[in-house]
Image (tube, rainbow, N blue to C red):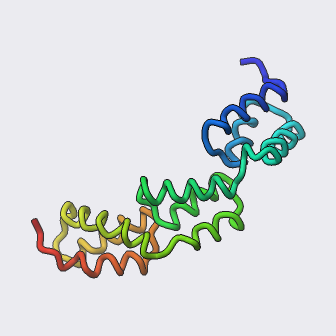
Amino acid sequence: MKPLSEEQALNRLAALCSQAEYCQGDMMKKMEQWGLADDACSRIIDYLVDNRYVDDSRYCRCFVEDKIRYNGWGRRKIEQALYAKQVSASIYRPILDEVPAETYVDILRPMLTQKWRTITGRNDYERSQKLIRFALGRGFDYDIIRRCIDGITSLPDD
């Protein structure tokens, strides 16, 4: 593949951004793959941000909403994913703070209820520990997990 010019890269990235939301980190990664010079990358990012093709705040709002609603992720896992995408913590923390704890409880409780039925263990304590590890792996906070588990462990087994 022959290297792209700055103008070709800008056109490709603008077309990508007009189809879906991307963050600056995603755009930088693409330009690095294409082998663009650092100064060209900076100019392209500035253009994309100035013309609102890329807006990390807008991207973050969509990302958080999608991961909670469709993937069933908790706050910690979303934070880690946004950190990996090089989104600034000053952008994503306020957005995550806007999500009420009840939203996480509403997502987690049915997930844990379903998982409780499939977990095997010698006793309820062992099963609840497995459930806690499952929920922690999904990125939920421990206090939210405890709130959900307290009502679930008393359910009869099917």
Q: Position of residue 82 (x, y in %)?
A: 61, 57
Q: Residue furthest left?
A: 158
Q: Would you say 44 lies left or right of 152 here?
A: right
Q: Position of residue 149 (x, y in %)?
A: 30, 77
Residue at position x 69%, y 31% in the image: 15
Q: Would you say 54 lies left or right of 97 here?
A: right
What is the tally of numbered marks visible in this picture? 0
Q: Position of residue 89 (x, y in %)?
A: 68, 65
The quarter of the image holding the N terminus is top right
Measured along the vertical axis of the image, is residue 151 above or below residue 74? below
Residue at position x 24%, y 71% in the image: 127
Measured along the vertical axis of the image, is residue 62 above or below residue 92? above
Residue at position x 31%, y 63% in the image: 111
For residue 88, which quarter of the picture?
A: bottom right
Of residues 136 and 99, the one drawn nearer to the viewer in this rendering: 99
Residue at position x 10%, y 65% in the image: 158
Measured along the vertical axis of the image, is residue 150 above or below residue 139? below
Q: Would you say 124 lies left or right of 68 here?
A: left
Q: Residue furthest top?
A: 2
Of residues 130 and 139, the one drawn nearer to the viewer in this rendering: 139
For residue 64, which quarter of the picture?
A: bottom right
Measured along the vertical axis of the image, is residue 78 above or below residue 8? below
Q: Would you say 108 lies left or right of 16 here?
A: left
